[in-house]
Image (cartoon, rainbow, N blue to C red):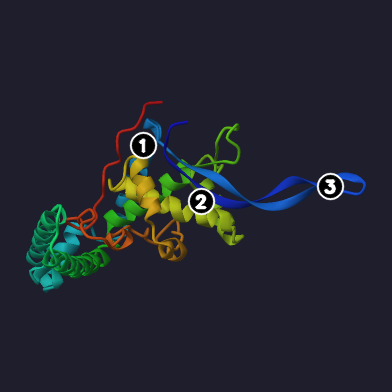
Amino acid sequence: MKEIYSFKVNKMLKVQVEEQTAEGKLVKDVEKNTPIKIIFKKPSRLESESADTVSAVEYAESVRKGILTKPLLEKLYDEKGGFLVDDYEGKYNSLLGTYFELETEFQKLNFKEVKTPEDQNKLKELAGDFVKVQNSLQSIEAARNNLFQNTAETRAQNRTIFWLTLFLTYTQEDEGKEPIALFSGKTFEEKIAEYDNYIDEDNIFVYQVIQKMIFFVTLWYLGRASSSEDFKKIEENLNPQIEEETPVVAPNDAPVVQPTIAETPITPFVEPPLESPVELAPIPTFDKE
């Protein structure tokens, strides 16, 4: 099985341990917190096509129910005088320009082999300015993303990400055994029913796995991470608060928690923010079955 990424999540398992007693060795079953390998499977061509179908069907169904598309919603706000008219693009592009100017100036000073006290003070000043600009970009992007979270495009995107998560999550308790699907159902509906049962039972292991997989699948689907190295770097820098507070997505209407700039480490000159709100992204090229 080809994988995009794998990580470990602890699970309580019954294991046999030996104890030395006066009568000899005693073997008993105990519960032990054991790290389980979770595999983000690389989709096949057939799975890619199925995910495309899920997206198209959900989009069409949303439009049929009267849910606005993004272009229609933009037009509506434009006609009624919403915040989009308030020079949104101008403000965003201005902040983005400042972002790159600060980056260039910071790098010039940071690459100097010998830094004067003035240089050190300037670096601190630039870092502070950078955080202010980044916070402003986050606020503008969050406001616009909130506006479009219930469009037909977003519903289709969320449904597709949830489908991919249920179909591409595998577990491997022993390196010598073949990985098995976390959700054994054959159809999307069967996997959703199994997912619902796990959540109703308060299965902590599945809850933790889904939290991470939703996050990783979303990053991959939106093109923000593609290689194992990308995901490893992201996982190493994940804020524990994100893992604790990110809600598990519901299969139907609840939106997927979209990774934003705020979910990446706030350090000077990380990857710059998107130049536009999140839109439907094409699924990457897959291997043929």
Which mark identifies residue 97? none
Is residue 153 depicted above or below 227 in this figure? below
Q: Residues within 10 Å of mark 1 (few under 14, many from 20)?
A: some
Any part of residue 271 in sight: yes
Task: Name which quarter of the figure residue 274 lies in.
Answer: bottom left
Which mark identifies residue 48? 1
Tell me the kind of residue under disc 3: Gln
Residue 44, image x, y percentages: 40, 32
Which mark is nearer the camera, 3 or 2? 3
Q: Which residue is mark 3?
A: 20
- Does the residue at mark 3 contact the one at mark 2 (Cβ under 8 Å)? no
Mark 3 and mark 1: Cα distance apart in space? 54 Å
Q: Classify mark 2: helix, strand or loop.
A: helix
Q: Which residue is mark 2?
A: 192
Residue 228, image x, y percentages: 37, 40
Tell me the kind of residue under disc 1: Ser
